[in-house]
Amino acid sequence: MEPIVTAEGLFKFHARDGQKLAILRDVSFEVGPAEFVCIMGPSGSGKSTLLHMLSGLDEPSAGLVKVRGKDMAQLSEEARTLERRASIGYVFQFFNLLPNLTVMENVGLPLAIAGGRPEAHHGEILALLDKLGIASKAGSFPHQLSGGEMQRTSIARALAGGQPLLLCDEPTGNLSQKAGLEVMQILRKLVDDDKRAVLLVTHNPRDAAFADRVAFLVDGLLAAEPVLRGPDIPVENVHAALAALHI
Ligand SMILES: Nc1ncnc2c1ncn2[C@@H]1O[C@H](COP(=O)(O)OP(=O)(O)OP(=O)(O)O)[C@@H](O)[C@H]1O
Ligand SMILES: [Mg+2]
């Protein structure tokens, strides 16, 4: 099956103090439909940078990103935006919800921005909120939610357009153990039941153990070994892999 997103030979350079720093070095990588992939690595190793390249928040210095087989650099800006918007949802550590909008309005906002009428999607959005266990919060404002509920709202917002891939950058980093575990169980269910794909960046071995595949990014390089494969990766194996890479 065609991957949803493919990185081929990605490089990212930044200038600092007159020096050219390689933040990503020849990273090749793909995420297929209904796959749950995790990337771990030390702080500053380039994980968020990689997600930015894949989602189009930033452009690679060299190499290419394909979304559902299309080379993003070959598309017009408008076609690129449409393809990415249809294919990829993004969730951050900080939930980035708009405080003056309800859960329903926050989740419908990307559809409105894309030119749709959120009311037309009311039923679908409610079904998604129900799947995420927050249907009863549809009329609540962000300040009336727990951290876990805020993160589930931002997951709903990222997927409301039917995107097959969800990129998650430390989605449990700001949550309690319990709320974080609930978010991970929801991500797993989205893969198993809904056939969405998830690309997760985390520092938490417990979260990584939910994935089907765990890869490690060190100094901008994707380590060839070890790559852990699920299902049911023992959390001790994640700890052992981190120790082996001195992470
Ligand atoms: N605009 C920029 N200019 C210069 N350097 C940058 C820029 N953006 C990121 N960097 C550097 O790139 C490196 C990788 O950053 P990145 O945010 O991708 O790391 P990360 O793996 O996500 O770390 P963390 O686990 O702390 O979130 C860091 O050394 C960072 O300082
Ligand atoms: Mg980061």
Image (spheres, rainbow, N blue to C red):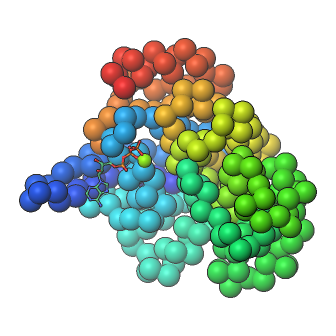
Viewer-side residue, 158 vs 183: 183
In this view, the residue farthest toward the front is 143
Residue at 67%, 58% (x, y): give it. 154
**Relative to residue 22, is residue 149 drawn left or right?**
right
Q: Quadrant of residue 229?
A: top right
Q: Is residue 199 visible?
A: no
136 lies above or below 183: below
| Extreme residue toward the left, this view | 18
The quarter of the image holding the C terminus is top left
Residue 203, how many percent across, how many down? 49, 34
The picture quadrant where one finds residue 66 is: bottom left
For the image, the number of numbered tags is: 0
Looking at the image, residue 118 sits to the left or right of residue 14; the answer is: right
Residue at figure coordinates x 50%, y 42% from the top left: 201
On the question of residue 206 being in view, the answer is yes
Percent position of residue 104, x then y: 80, 68
Q: In the image, what residue occupies the spot 33% across and 41% down?
A: 45
Q: Residue at x 61, y 57 (%)?
A: 95
Q: Nearer the viewer, residue 67 or 134?
A: 134
Q: Residue 106 occupies which quadrant of the picture?
A: bottom right
Residue 122 lies left or right of residue 227; in this view the side is right
**Eyeballing the image, is 154 above or below 224?**
below
Query: From what the image shows, is residue 135 above or below residue 171?
Result: below
Residue 213 screen position, x and y as percent: 55, 32
The answer to whether residue 112 is left or right of residue 236 is right
